[in-house]
Image: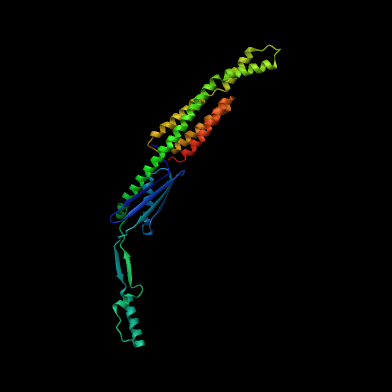
């Protein structure tokens, strides 16, 4: 199944920890993963990257992770030494200004840095166990979109491969009659130039044979058809096929260029131009395939 590198997926896990995971992927030659998550949980970044590396082969992947209901237990500590110092200073101030009222606990509680709130952070194992289901859901939705995009890409690729196949068949038919056409033109030109001189038929036939040998594109046609078949077979592969397709497309370009170089037939040259045009479009589409 061909997969596009473009897609989006969202996953959510509501439990003790409310994780929301969003994953977006776009075209890239290699695999690049960027993770954005709340500062307290940055220690999970490499673990998340390694987990996703086992699921995706190519593309730039942006992972956005948020923890919305952070029901993290807290431990409140009171700095009793600091409270005592505040109390002593307030007593001194009270005596100094002659204040008659009491120094209340509520007044002391307003003093800065009296209370220290420490979050009792969960263990990495506990956090990871609640986060993975959200990542899996996001990946599943991402893959569905990438597969859907892949189907559309393949429809377009298949149509263009069929056009190339038909153009290749036309070239093959034109190549069969090329020596005979060359012989006609050669005879016509010689008769125009040498109307009063007898022509050496053996020499003419030799020239035609040499032309046929130089212009022979049978091997290139066979290889081009083979590449077309290989490209079509890749649609059923369970592996990432983008790089293989790109390599095959390069080889197809090579064969087509060789055909163009060998042939002197204008009709074949026209077919070659059409094939190159389709190959360019195919290579553009392949850049989107994982």
Q: Is residue 255 above or below residue 184?
A: below
Quarter of the image with the C terminus in it? top left
Query: Residue 164: x and y, percent?
Result: 49, 29
Q: Nearer the viewer, residue 111 or 213?
A: 111
Q: How many marks?
A: 0
User: Which residue lies most toward the right here?
Assistant: 196
At 59% from the left and 20% from the top, the residue drawn is 211
Q: Looking at the picture, how far across and down is residue 280, in whole percent?
A: 51, 36
- Find residue 115 and report its horizontal and vertical position in percent: 32, 71
Whether residue 133 is visible? yes
The N terminus appears in which quarter of the rendering? Answer: top left
Colour scheme shown: rainbow
Which residue is most to the bottom?
98
Q: Quadrant of residue 89?
A: bottom left
Location of residue 277 in the rendering, given as x and y in whole percent from the top left corner? 53, 34
User: Does residue 144 lie above or below 165 as drawn?
Assistant: below
Residue 193, relative to residue 56: is it above or below? Answer: above
Q: Is residue 227 visible?
A: no
| 99 sits to left or right of 158 | left
Position above or below: 110 against 146: below
- Rendered residue at 46%/28% (across/down): 226
Outermost top residue = 198
């Amino acid at each position: 199944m061909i997969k596009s590198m473009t897609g989006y997926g969202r996953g959510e896990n509501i439990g003790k920890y409310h994780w929301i995971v969003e994953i977006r992927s776009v075209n890239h030659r290699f695999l690049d993963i960027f993770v954005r998550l709340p500062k307290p949980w940055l220690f999970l970044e490499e673990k998340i990257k390694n987990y996703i590396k086992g699921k995706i082969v190519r593309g730039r992947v942006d992972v956005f992770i948020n923890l919305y209901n952070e029901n993290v237990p807290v431990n409140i500590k009171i700095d009793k030494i600091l409270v005592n110092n505040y109390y002593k200073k307030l007593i001194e101030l009270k005596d100094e200004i002659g204040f008659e009222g009491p120094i209340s606990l509520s007044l002391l509680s307003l003093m800065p840095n009296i209370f220290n709130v420490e979050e009792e952070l969960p263990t990495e194992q506990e956090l990871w166990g609640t986060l993975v289901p959200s990542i899996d859901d996001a990946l599943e939705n991402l893959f569905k979109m990438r597969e859907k995009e892949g189907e559309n890409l393949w429809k377009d690729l298949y149509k263009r491969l069929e056009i190339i196949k038909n153009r290749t068949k036309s070239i093959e038919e034109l190549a069969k009659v090329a020596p005979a056409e060359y012989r006609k033109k050669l005879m016509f030109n010689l008769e125009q130039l040498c109307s009063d001189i007898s022509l050496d038929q053996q020499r003419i036939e030799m020239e035609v044979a040499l032309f046929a040998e130089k212009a022979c594109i049978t091997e290139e046609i066979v290889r081009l058809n083979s590449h077309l078949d290989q490209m079509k077979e890749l649609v059923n592969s369970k592996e990432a096929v983008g790089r293989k397709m790109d390599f095959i497309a390069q080889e197809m370009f090579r064969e087509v260029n060789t055909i163009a170089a060998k042939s002197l037939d204008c009709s074949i040259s026209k077919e070659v131009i059409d094939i190159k045009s389709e190959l360019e479009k195919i290579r553009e589409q392949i850049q989107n395939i994982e």
